[in-house]
């Protein structure tokens, strides 16, 4: 997806990713991702009101097939924003 910094998972089923190179508004970013791809993610500001605008959280507490499908949908979406 072109994400530059991902925190290692810490005993949970999610990934905390830095999207600061793509946006400074994680809420709008995640809303647009959902509208465009149908993939739901959580904006970092939900978990960190101070620095969370530059982060998002991906849950992978689903089947491998669902994770693969979400990645297939998100890959071109992220690529278009990184260009």
Image (cartoon, rainbow, N blue to C red):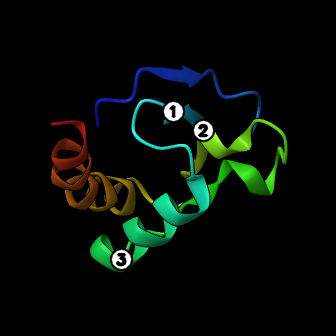
* Total labels drawn: 3
Q: CA separation, marks 3 and 1?
A: 22 Å
Classify 10 Å Cα crowding around label 1: few (below 14), some (14-19), many (20 and above): some
Would residue 14 be visible to someone looking at this image? no
Q: Residue at x 60, y 62 (%)?
A: 27
**Helix, strand or loop at mark 2:** helix
Q: Are marks 1 and 2 in contact (CB under 8 Å)?
A: yes
Q: Quadrant of the N terminus?
A: top left
Indicate left or right for 1 with 13 as reference.
Answer: left
Q: Position of residue 35 (x, y in %)?
A: 37, 79
Question: Which residue lies under the disc numbered 2?
Answer: 54
Residue annotated with mark 3: 38
* Left or right, residue 35 beside residue 51: left
37 in relation to 26, above or below: below
Query: Percent position (x, y) of residue 29?
Result: 47, 59
Above or below, 73 against 47 in this view is: below
- Residue beneath the point at 29% across and 51% down: 71
Eye-nearest disc, 3 or 1: 1
Picture layout, residue 58 above or below residue 50: below
Quote the CA–CA distance across marks 1 and 2.
4 Å
For mark 2, does the 10 Å Cα neighbourhood hold few (<14), some (14 to 19), or many (20 or more) residues? many
Image: 82 above or below 9: below
Label 3 to label 2, Cα distance in Å? 21 Å
- Residue drawn at x 54%, y 51% is 60
Name the disc covering residue 20, or none.
1
Point out residue 46 in the picture as x, y percentages from the top left corner: 78, 57
């Amino acid at each position: 997806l072109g994400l530059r910094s991902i925190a290692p998972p810490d005993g949970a089923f999610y990934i905390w990713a830095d999207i600061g190179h793509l946006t400074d508004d994680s809420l709008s970013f995640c809303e647009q991702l959902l509208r465009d791809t149908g993939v739901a993610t959580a904006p970092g500001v939900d978990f960190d009101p101070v620095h969370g605008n530059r982060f998002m959280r991906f849950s992978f507490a689903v089947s491998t097939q669902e994770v693969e499908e979400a990645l297939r949908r998100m890959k071109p979406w992220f690529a278009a924003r990184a260009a």
